[in-house]
Amino acid sequence: MVVKRGRVVLVLVLLLCYLSVVVAETVEYYPTDLGNIWVLETADGTERVTYTIEAAEERIDGREIARFKRTAETVGTDETTGETYFVHFDDDGVKLHKVVAELGSIFGTATAVLSPPALFFPASFALGDSWGFTLETEVVLTGRVSVSSVYEVVAVEDVVTPAGTFENCLKIQLNSRTVSTSSIGRSTSYQWLAPNVGIVKVETSQDIVFNLIRSNLVPDASAYDVTGDGVVNILDLVFVAARLGDVDTAADVNADGTVDILDLTLIAQNLGD
């Protein structure tokens, strides 16, 4: 019994030391797993925008490509607009190869190809960072169009949404400059990215605000409250640490068939929830 208790204490000490060094370095502001989905709506529920990451059948320059899609709709109608970004993921971040924009029934579809690919989102970024790229395309009724986009991290804020409260979100300002044969237009929009969750809020250039209502990246904190006392705390860590190596569904929070360091890490990342 004494040996078992000593092992539990040692595991907890090692885990907490590990988390203090590593967890802060593994924050993702745009989680890139295939199948990720974020759904945002206006406060009155009349407009919705959905972001998804899907597998793409095509390959570009020998690389496997994913589709990052943004679909905007007015709830209750069939009309949608949006863009599909064809991307690949590497150590530098999300790289953009092609954009296909659905502009509605009047302007149709516009396609822009980038070669070499541009940096869409860095693997990591912080307050004050900026990046950008330029797209060239043809638009029905408009002709040749050039769109330059510059992203900048302008603030760190907490964001309250119907899906929950997200702390330390990066506020990204997007300045766009659109040049056609007949006009030059400028716009500014914003999006807020939560650590390890992704996009939780958007404000368009028309001052329309969308907040996250659901996603498959917002965990149910109750899954980590293995003691059932209403909060994720050190008692949950002790409960799981005492069952390391066992087959115990109560302590196997990620349901992979065994109780191991991954279960402890998940609970530690959700302490206080």
Image (cartoon, rainbow, N blue to C red):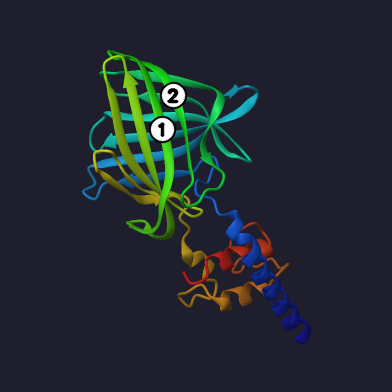
- Viewer-side residue, 142 vs 81: 142
Q: Please provide percent x and percent y for residue 51.
A: 41, 39
Q: Residue at x 60, y 54 (%)?
A: 26
Towards the viewer: 15 or 237: 15
Of residues 190 and 41, the one nearer the viewer is 190
Quick one: 152 or 238, which is closer to the camera? Answer: 152
The residue that mark 1 highlights is 149
Q: Is residue 254 visible?
A: no
Residue name at image x 61 percent, y 65 percent: 249
Q: Which residue is mark 2?
A: 135
Q: Mark 2 falls on what kind of element? A: strand
User: In the rendered image of this protein, does residue 82 appear above or below residue 141?
Assistant: below
Within 10 Å of the Cα at label 2, are there few (<14), some (14-19), or many (20+) other Cα atoms? some
Give the residue furthest to the right.
Answer: 3
Residue found at x 52% / y 70%: 271
| Left or right position of 74 against 243 | left
Q: Name the image quarter holding residue 183.
A: top left
Give percent across and percent down for residue 11: 71, 73
Q: Amino acid at mark 1?
A: Ser
Across and down, in percent, residue 138 comes to 37, 15
The three-letter code of the residue at mark 2 reads Leu
Q: Are marks 1 and 2 in contact (CB under 8 Å)?
A: yes
Taking the image as drawn, is residue 53 in sight? Answer: yes
